[in-house]
Image (tube, grey):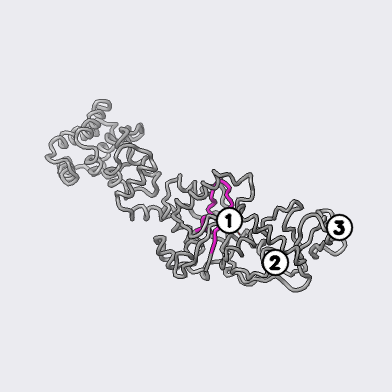
């Protein structure tokens, strides 16, 4: 079994394309152990800059998708394309025709709109493939079943321009034959190209691969995913703080036909479970809330050291985030959630006047904070257990509800009402910084 991913380097990897890459990779790394070929379809010089190619390889590397052969550049196959073209011309399976849009329109006017265009061999002009007038070009799509196109309805397709440069469907067909691809998994947007690619293969006497056209991924309102309405590309997901493991997990589930009661899988587990035949025909819906939820699970599954490493890279912080990561990991769903939650440990308290007004606004609250400060100053060892013991004793003595004691402390330390656990926060800040922050609140609010 040989599969391929054949992206055009456009400068971003759309989520739909990422899923195509992932499904190919799952087949390759699953029980069938397919060989995974990467082919960069770089024939459009405007879009296929080196930067865009690098961007594409970077997105695949970030997702953790490795390949076995390639990257093959479509532009490196030019000689093969020319040789195949020459064979078809010599064999009479293709011909040169001067016919343009006007001739094709005139042909339809005479023969009816349902009739595919058939040209004359003019010995010059663009190269067209001869399509038979009888029979049908048929393939059995693994996902969609049999798809038959009557040959008489298809135009003799242009496969190369008058200058000899080949067209897309011809190049893809030749490349897939050359790479001995046995299974083509790609987006449904390519389904209309398949009959033309099959005609090219048939004319070249090649055995076509099996095709599986993956349903599109849509947003919740049924529209195509677009940048304007949330994340649409791998790069955006990365910038939003999603982990590659979670992205691979989530996109794999989109339409893979797994049982709905299980969702958390490592890439290796996904590869073990993935079955092409189980892929669903219906459009898949991308729900960023589900991705967030799954991302939180993957994040908590990472060892603290590894999560710390990723957060150092994501935030670019040069301080050691380890202690903060340990106390925040239960409360964040994405890497981007970390700094808003933990930044106050390093940058000082946030400035949230509403939080201060609510929890440090009255004389009783200031008195409570002062009592807490005095008690904390006596804690023998500054660790979570001792801090918790000291403050719960105080809570009992003062006869307050937990929030009445802990929220003023929290606002003094963090400047706002949301933070990691209060004892953990005190422990990470240490005695000097904790007491200094409390003292500052006592001076400014008291
Ligand atoms: N280069 C095409 C794309 O990026 C894919 C071609 C194919 O898979 O056959 O959409």
Residue under label 3: 106
Whether ligand 1 has any atom under 8 Å from the Cβ at mark 3 is answered as no
Residue under label 1: 222
Left or right, 126 with reference to 271 = right
Give the x, y percent position of residue 27.
Answer: 49, 65
User: Could you say whether the residue bearing mark 3 is in a helix, strand or loop?
Assistant: helix
**Residue 399, quarter of the rendered image:** top left
Left or right, 161 with reference to 341 = right
Does 16 appear in magenta? yes
User: Could you say whether the residue bearing mark 2 is in a helix, strand or loop?
Assistant: helix
Boundaries of the magenta span: 3-21
Q: Are marks 1 and 3 in contact (CB under 8 Å)?
A: no
Depth check, mark 2 against mark 3: the one in front is 2
Q: Residue furthest right?
A: 110
For label 3, the crowd category at 10 Å Cα-Cα, with few meaning under 14, some 14 to 19 and many 20 or more, is few
Q: Quadrant of the C terminus?
A: top left
Residue under label 2: 199
Left or right, 234 with reference to 245 = right
Give the x, y percent position of residue 73.
Answer: 58, 53
Left or right, 268 with reference to 411 = right
């Amino acid at each position: 079994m040989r599969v391929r991913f054949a992206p055009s380097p456009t400068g971003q990897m759309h989520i739909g394309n990422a899923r195509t890459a992932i499904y190919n990779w799952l087949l390759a790394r699953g029980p069938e152990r397919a060989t995974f070929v990467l082919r960069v379809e770089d024939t459009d010089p405007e879009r296929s800059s080196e930067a865009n190619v690098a961007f594409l390889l970077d997105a695949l590397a970030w997702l953790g998708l490795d390949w076995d052969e390639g990257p093959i550049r479509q532009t490196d196959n030019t000689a093969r394309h020319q040789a195949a073209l020459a064979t078809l011309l010599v064999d009479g399976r293709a011909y040169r025709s001067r016919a343009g849009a006007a001739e094709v329109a005139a042909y339809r006017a005479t023969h009816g709109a349902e009739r595919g265009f058939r040209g004359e061999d003019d010995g010059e002009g663009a190269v067209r493939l001869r399509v038979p007038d009888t029979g049908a070009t048929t393939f059995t799509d693994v996902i969609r079943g049999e798809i038959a196109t009557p040959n008489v309805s298809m135009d003799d397709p242009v496969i190369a321009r008058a200058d000899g440069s080949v067209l897309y469907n011809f190049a893809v067909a030749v490349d897939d034959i050359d790479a001995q691809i046995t299974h083509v998994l790609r987006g449904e947007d390519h389904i209309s190209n398949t009959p033309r690619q099959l005609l090219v293969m048939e004319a070249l006497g090649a055995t076509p691969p099996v095709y599986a056209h993956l349903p599109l991924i849509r947003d919740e309102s049924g529209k195509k995913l677009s940048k304007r309405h949330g994340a649409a590309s791998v790069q955006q997901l990365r910038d939003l703080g999603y982990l590659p493991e979670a992205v691979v997990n989530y996109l794999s589930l989109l339409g893979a036909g797994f049982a709905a009661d299980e969702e958390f899988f490592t890439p290796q587990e996904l590869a073990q479970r993935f079955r092409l035949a189980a892929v669903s025909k219906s459009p898949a819906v991308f729900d960023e809330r589900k991705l967030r939820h799954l991302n939180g699970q993957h994040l908590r599954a990472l060892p603290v050291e590894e999560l710390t490493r990723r957060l150092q890279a994501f935030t670019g912080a040069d301080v050691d985030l380890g202690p903060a990561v340990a106390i925040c990991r239960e409360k964040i769903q994405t890497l981007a959630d970390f700094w808003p939650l933990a930044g106050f440990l390093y940058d000082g308290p946030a400035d949230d006047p509403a939080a201060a007004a609510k929890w440090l606004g009255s004389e009783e609250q200031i008195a409570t904070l002062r009592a807490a400060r005095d008690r904390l100053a006596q804690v023998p060892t500054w660790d979570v257990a001792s801090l918790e013991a000291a403050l719960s004793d105080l809570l009992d003595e003062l006869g307050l509800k937990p929030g009445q004691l802990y929220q003023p402390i929290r606002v003094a330390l963090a400047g706002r009402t949301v933070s990691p656990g209060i004892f953990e926060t005190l422990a990470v800040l240490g005695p000097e910084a904790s007491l200094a922050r409390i003292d500052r609140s006592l001076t400014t609010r008291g």
